[in-house]
Amino acid sequence: MTSTASTNGTNDISSMNSANGAPARILIIEDDVDINDIMAARLGKDGHACTQAWSGSEAALRLDTQEFDLIITDLMLPGLAGEGIVELVRSRSAHTPIIVVSARVTPTDKVSLLKLGADDYLTKPFDLDELAMRVEVQLRHRELRREKATRDVGAVDAIGAASSADSANATAAGDPNIAGSADSADGTGGNATRGAIDATSPSPSDPNHAGAAFARPAHDTRNVTRFGRWEIDSDARTLSVDGRDISLTRLEFNIVELLVKHPRKVFTKRELFELAWGEPYSVEDNTVNVHVSRIRSKLKDTGTDSYISTVWGLGFKLVEE
């Protein structure tokens, strides 16, 4: 595949993505020119638009001016290291997939990167077909998350509209100043007269007017579940402790939501992985443990990190203080 230099100093390899009719925009950050070119060429064959950067500093500039669907980054980079790239991307987006490729092979390195927010880790040397498959998996998960978010927004809008309509109808039925809500006391057709709003009466928008209540929802329509001092809002995808919001990544929230929705269930690591990640659990690894550890760390200063209990030999469950 031919690579042509673009005006912004990167090499762009573009073709159509058969899944949605548009190329997936991938930023490849690798200081080894040969490896960078090989990755870009291989992913370009799958229909992706690859933008290449050869230093962390250059990548940071690209991230300031362009949007990407997926990031592939090495760790040992000139300028800004790969860890800094992961932090930079995560500070701006919780959903952009990040795949780290590195010669570092220790479990500590992998755990550290997952804690920072990387979605996958591939050790050098790696197979190009395996890289391509991991890219496809991460892009598929990203698209599923976007579809779910769109459905959730639509559901919230529908609930809000229905709640407003119900509230308005209920107010109209009981307000004697609204046409048709009551017959006249003398039965002489005062319905029409009383149905008109008296010009001298307070406006319904006046907070002192009884009818002003129609502007407020009749009830809380949020999809909220509580456990101890925790409150999760599944629509807003937030966790709060005593009213204080706790910042969670997408996968961390998925784990917490599963535990809170089923507080008496012991989840195996396989169950948590397959439900939270949405993909088969094929090998025994430390991924779930790392994410649970990170959740506990974020909750430590609230005193509720002990809510997540390890059931040795099985998995995790919730226990209240």
Image (tube, rainbow, N blue to C red):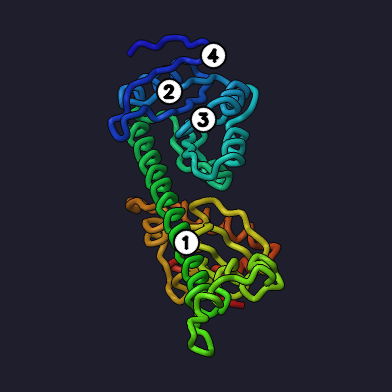
The first of marks 3 and 4 along the sequence is 4
Q: Can residue 316 be seen from the camera position used here?
A: no
Q: Are marks 2 and 3 in contact (CB under 8 Å)?
A: no
Amino acid type, label 2: Cys
The residue wearing badge 1 is 161
What's the CA distance linking mark 1 and mark 4?
A: 47 Å
Q: Quadrant of the N terminus?
A: top left
Amino acid type, label 1: Ala
Q: Quadrant of the C terminus?
A: bottom right
The first of marks 1 and 3 along the sequence is 3
The residue wearing badge 4 is 8
Give the foreground label among 4 and 2: 4
The first of marks 1 and 2 along the sequence is 2
Q: Residue at x 35, y 11 (%)?
A: 2
Amino acid type, label 4: Asn
Amino acid type, label 3: Glu
**Is 22 placed above or below 315 here?**
above
Mark 2 residue crowding within 10 angstroms, few (<14) / some (14–19) / many (20+): many
